[in-house]
Image: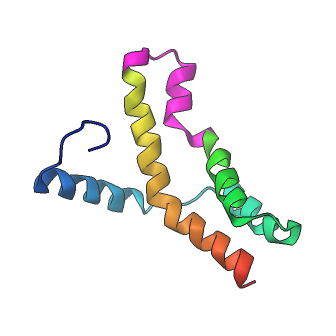
Amino acid sequence: LLLTGKIPNEDQVAAVSADLAARADKQVPDSVMQMLNTFPALGVHPMTQLVQAILAMQPQSKFADAYERGVNKKDLWEFAYEDSMDILAVLPKIAGAIYRNTFHD
């Protein structure tokens, strides 16, 4: 809806849901989890931890790679979409780690 301005049909919703479920099997990079595990001792706010985790995933960015390779600007949205879906898929793992580290460890 946000990308096209059109309400998706049931098949499209199912396809996006299946795509997210498949991507959810991806692991958050170890370097990101290690970084998150150090933040509570430093008193870093949970929202700051979330922002830093997303920024730390930049080395795996399909958009950054495509941009670096000089992909045509009109095609870059596809790589931004891929990155967005990858982040959405692992966001529960990141949020869970932040919550656990900040409020329970």
Picture quadrant where residue 105 is located: bottom right
Where does residue 53 sit, x and y in percent of width and height?
66, 54
Single out the residue that lies furthest toward the bottom: 104
Q: Residue furthest right?
A: 42
Note whether residue 26 is visible: no
Magenta segment main secondary structure: helix
Position in image of residue 66 (x %, y %): 49, 25
On screen, residue 63 versus residue 58, left or right, reads left
Q: What range of the chain is rendered magenta?
A: 59-74
Identify the residue at image location x=12%, y=51%.
9
- Drawn side of residue 84 relative to residue 100, left or right: left
Among the 4 quarters of the image, the one containing residue 46: bottom right
Q: Where is residue 92 in the image (x, y as percent from the top left)?
A: 50, 67
Total label count? 0
The residue lying at 35 percent from left, 57 percent from top is 20
Location of the N terminus (image quadrant): top left
Q: Is residue 82 above or below residue 87?
A: above
Q: Above or below — where is 3 with respect to 24?
A: above
